[in-house]
Image (tube, rainbow, N blue to C red):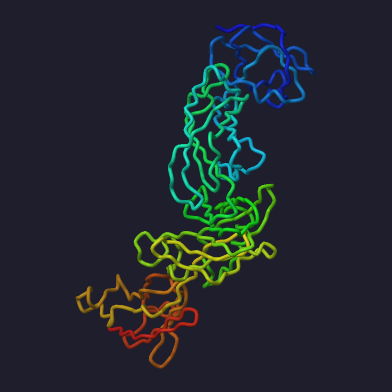
Amino acid sequence: MTKRALAASFLFCAAAALLPAPGSCAWEKIRSSEAPLAVTYSSSGVYEISYTVGDNCASPGELSAAPSSVWSGYLSLVPADVVNQGLAGFASTSSLALDGALVGLTPGESVDLVFGAELSQDFSSPGVNVTQVYDNTASEVNSTWTVTVAYSGQKLVITPSDSWRKGSVFSVYFSSSIVDINGSPVSSAATVYFSVMMDYAADNTAASFSDRRVRVTIPANAYAQDFYVTLSTDATRSAVTEANGRLASLPGSPEFLNTVSVRPYDSAGNLVQPNAACVVTLPYTDADGDGLVDGTLSRMKVSNLSVWHLDETRGLWTRQAGATLDAAARQVSQPVTHFSNYALMALGDTDVGPVYAYPVPFRPGAGDAARYGSWADLITFTNLPAYGKIRIYTVSGALVRELAVAPPSMKWDLKNSGGQTVASGVYLWEVTSGKNRKTGKLVVIK
């Protein structure tokens, strides 16, 4: 049933940006569980809007602090595209939000979840479960934590019965039974995470929320007071993309794998560096254990991995010494004395020792392609390095053809630099990569 009215009763402020001027209203409806209502603009007189009795809608809690327009009546607003907008964020003065999580909560502080509508204490059944997921060493715990739950406007306030354990990561699960003042769910069920300030007197390990394999280990007393660190693995940050763009495009340049930005804060929220060596750990992928990094453009050996530091003044990556490879854990660890931006990179393999060419001899007319090759298969160079050159010469030393290495294997089409098929005879080949060089012999019998 739809009704219209021009009544006025209780007044409170609303943001003009949330409701367009009369004549171009983007709101689907204004609804109320009580009497019909009207909206009065201070600049344009009375504006009449329809609503449907009994329909669910979101509440106008977010409008209460706005300065410009005046609403009459007890309102509840629903734009067509903002129904059940879910968790809006966290409310905290002592911590930071990163990757959808809250970082650096104090041990006795409540967790305030802010929703997009005013919550109903009478109708809601939040079903909140809080779990200590990791301890201060980033080890799994998965222990249930006792809390109390309260409502405050758009906030669901979660208070621990015992203080949050320092350095730990907690998860907060809330059900879809949290509703607004009209009884409509404000969010689907979800889980959010937060971490607690670290105890300066203990050994601590912080792990990224987006990739738990990305870690920073901080020894006891590296700080003079409790602290926390944020870890971001976002490779699209401008400082990272600009530095990556400056990586030389010439052969032998390192290949970027992943990154972490580490930012340390004291309990007052000030950036503060450690006074002792810490360790940054970055992961890599080698699913088949063949010693080659999966997903790299060239053949990148695990043994050639290294950690690089971003010189933000020059916008350049600089290679760090002293990294430790853990092939079993598929990770590289780097001692550092300063937290900032670090990246894991792979240097191209220049080892030419395994390179060989086949078949030798190349005799396509012999009728045994498996042994002597064919014009369809040509001559193959295999086990090639990440970059370099292949040069083919006559026995007198004349250059026949030069090819850029394309690992791991590539073919020579038996043509010279002029595009002509070479004559039968003996040829010498040379592969160079970096400072390494290897030679061999080919025989062509047409």
Q: Residue furthest right?
A: 43
Which residue lies most toward the left here?
367
Asked if residue 300 is positioned above or below residue 107 in the image, the reply reads below
Where residue 234 sits: x, y (%)?
Answer: 56, 52
Direction from residue 426 to residue 315 in the image, left or right: right
- Give the residue at x 55% y 24%: 83
Residue 138 spot, x, y in % from top left: 48, 51
Residue 130 in sight from this viewpoint: yes
Q: Nearer the viewer, residue 321 or 370?
A: 321
Left or right: 303 with respect to 315? left
Say above or below: 325 vs 186. Answer: below
> Quadrant location of the N terminus?
top right
- The part of the image, by quadrant, that contains residue 446 is bottom left
Taking the spot 61% from the left edge, 8% from the top edge, the residue there is 34
Left or right: 256 with respect to 9?
A: left
Q: How many marks?
A: 0
Residue 134, x across and y down, in percent: 47, 47
- Residue 317 vs 125, above or below: the answer is below
Confirm whether residue 446 shows in the render.
no
Taking 131 as reference, is 51 above or below it?
Answer: above
